[in-house]
Image: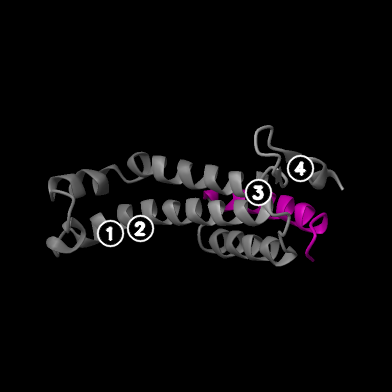
Amino acid sequence: MGPRRSAVAHPKSGVTAGPVPVVGASLVGIGVLHVAATRRFYPESVRSIIQGRVLGAVEADPEQAAVRGVGFWYATAGLGVIALGRAVGQVERADRLRLDTAAVLAGIGAWGVSLIPKSGFWLFFPVAALAAVRARASRVR
């Protein structure tokens, strides 16, 4: 019952807020780190996109498309994780997190780790475990 105890009434409106969205916030954090790490892990890609004047740069020069595409997709994946975290956070605040959310997060981790063992995909496993705990305490199962 721990997650439901975190519901509090907003002092001005009296509206009750649901549990603090720790699963959603964790995903947003992973996504932010992912986007921020783009420049560190793919500096040549970022440099090439800037040299290509950013807009339309990924496919503008066929010889640079692969180099530019790697950084673009790396950053875009991070943005996707941020969006996922925001969506999961909304569901979590409504105390409606489902157990299959944990399964999906674990599946993403397993997929990523199976293809890139030395990666941040390992971070999805503790977040999936946290989601399972939160989902079991949720109003929906």
Q: CA distance from mark 3 to mark 4?
A: 16 Å
Instruction: Tell me the crowding category of disc 3: few under 14, some 14 to 19, or many 20 or more residues within 10 angstroms, Cα based.
Output: many
Query: Which segment is the magenta one?
Result: 119-141
What is the three-letter code of the residue carrying label 4?
Ala
Viewer can see residue 108: yes
The spot of residue 100 in percent (x, y) is 70, 67
On screen, residue 8 versus residue 41, left or right, reads right
User: Which circle, 1 or 3, is nearer the viewer?
Assistant: 3
The spot of residue 116 in percent (x, y) is 51, 58
- Give me the residue at 31% from left, 55% from top: 72
Question: Pointers 1 and 2 in contact (CB under 8 A)?
Answer: yes
User: Which circle, 2 or 4, is nearer the viewer?
Assistant: 4
Q: Which residue is mark 1?
A: 69
Of residues 56 and 12, the one drawn nearer to the viewer in this rendering: 12
Question: Pointers 1 and 3 in contact (CB under 8 A)?
Answer: no
Q: Which residue is mark 3?
A: 23
Q: CA distance from mark 1 to mark 2?
A: 6 Å
